[in-house]
Image (tube, coloured by chain):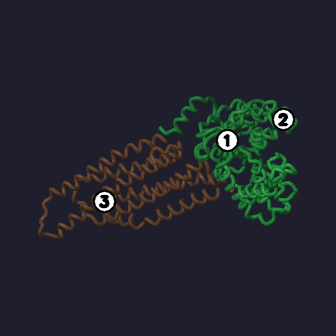
Chain colours: A green, B brown
Amino acid sequence: MSDSQQTRSQTETRTTGSDQPLETTSGETVEETKDEWVEYDFQGQAKMAAEDLDVYYGDDHALKHVSMEIPEKSVTALIGPSGCGKSTYLRCLNRMNDRINAARVDGSVRLDGKEIYQDGINLVELRKRVGMVFQSPNPFPKSIRDNISYGPRKHGDIETGLLARLLGRDESEAERELVERSLKQAALWDEVNDRLDDNALGLSGGQQQRLCIARCLSVDPEVILMDEPASALDPIATAKIEDLISDLAEEYTVVIVTHNMQQAARISDQTAVFLTGGKLVEYGDTDQIFEDPRSQRVEDYISGKFG
Amino acid sequence: MTREEYQASLADLRAEVVDMGALVADRLGRALTALETVDEVAARAVAGADDAVDRRYLDLESTCIQLFARQQPVAGDLRFVASSFKIVTDLERIGDLAVNLAQYTLAADRKRFEEVDLSAIGDRSRAMLDDAMDAYRTDDAPLCREIAARDDELDALCQHASERVVRDLIEREVDDGDSWAVEELLDDVSRLLLVIRDLERVGDHAVNIAARTLYMVESDPQLV
């Protein structure tokens, strides 16, 4: 018996209840469905871990008891229909939900074993370590160079002013190195190195998105969260972003929300499937999810049979 | 293509593969009957009609490629299309083997080695093919495993038959002076050995079909 079969039979013994397709979106039906295959024994270290995470937007219970570890230096895809809670989960990983007044978060999220939902956490520092790239490219209306150096300046990574000069640090040299390194990491350097002082809004959509990734990288994050980073881009720009994501996973932990199932299949190492009702239904190796999902509901969803 | 059409096209694919299986099984059956009854007309008909099988094979291969390209099937759908894609190749090969058998019927003197029971071997391999296609049609995983087990029996029968032919050849007294008779005997013996091997190969292809079907139904690559 192979490893995967063994895991499966153990899981089947553990879980009980029906494996019926979801017929309604009412809370009761979802609560009663226990076809969850979320225990995932991956190789390597967990960079982040959520435990019994619940999120409410007012009375709306948007995320229900999600426990899920994110392996370091790999790409984790979160997929599921609209309103399933995948973006909500993503935003919990750097406490972006704090910015929504009606949102309430229960449960635990740890980064390198340290609880991020505790008093006294420096949110600026957290979001530097856990960066985010959004669906629509949102560069600052500034030069390409300033887009990159803005964050490090804010965080004080580039020494500024008199003190730096007195200490013999060459500010502009440090900035130049940083801008070049970040743009190269985001595979944008070759396309923009002769016009770094141009306004970033003059770049194409795909270039703007890579600039946003470069901006995210410039503060030296450990985890990069991406919320549908290629959904507004054409296939060529999408392919560049996808290549970039694979490269980034060698050094960073990448978590990506995508509506594009094939994209998740192409670029991720592991896939988590959220289904309507804010529940994580299945989590495992991407190969396994797309070839042989355990949950019938997940099979139906990824095959386009419902949802 | 809408989702309903996609689901319908998967159902069509299965029906067409089953249909191709029936066509190939029919060819194989006719070739075996021709061999048994030394019916040259029937044998010639099988030998000359491989084009229909080849056309089906190419059509179905192209259907699968289209589905991969345009629908990017995943999960159970992926295993189904991928398995069908492989199974049509096995069916096409069985079609070729049926042609081989027919050609042998036309060329050989079946009065030699009458004691070798080719029809028993042929019936067994044909039954394996029929059952494999039944398993594919009805998602029958236990039947797939049973077919794989039956292949050992077929192999043993074939080996026994081959040994018998060779032993017979060794023991047979041939007039060395009659070089034409020696030549003819050698031709017949080698042809017969090839027939036995071809029937064994039909069984192997039936096992391949069962293996792909098992993967399709249970994602179990055990027999592949």
Residue A85 pos. (x, y %): 76, 39
Q: What residue does disc 2 label?
A: A103
* Residue under the image location 56 percent in, 50 percent down: B80
User: Marks 2/1: CA distance?
Assistant: 23 Å
Q: Is residue A258 above or below residue A62?
A: below
Q: CA distance from mark 2 to mark 3?
A: 76 Å
The local crowd at label 3, few if under 14, some if 14 to 19, many if 20 or more residues have their Cα within 10 Å, is some
Mark 2 in CB contact with mark 3 (< 8 angstroms): no
Which residue in the structure is indicated by mark 1?
Answer: A272
Pointer 2 and pointer 1 on the same chain: yes
Horizontal and vertical percent position of residue B223: 45, 45
Please state which amino acid type lies under the numbered disc 3.
Leu
Quadrant of the image containing the C terminus of chain A: top right
Q: Nearer the viewer, residue B157 or A99?
A: A99
Q: What amino acid is at disc 2?
A: Ala
Which is more toward the observer, B3 or B42? B3
Looking at the picture, which amino acid does disc 1 mark?
Ala
Residue B194's tag is 3
Q: How far from the left and from the top, in percent, is residue B27?
A: 41, 59
Q: Please, what secondary structure does the residue beneath circle 1 have?
A: strand
SS at badge 2: strand
Q: Residues within 10 Å of mark 1 (few under 14, many from 20)?
A: many
B223 with respect to B194 (left or right)? right
Residue B132 lies, in percent from the top left, at 45, 48
Q: Label 1 is found on which chain of the structure?
A: A
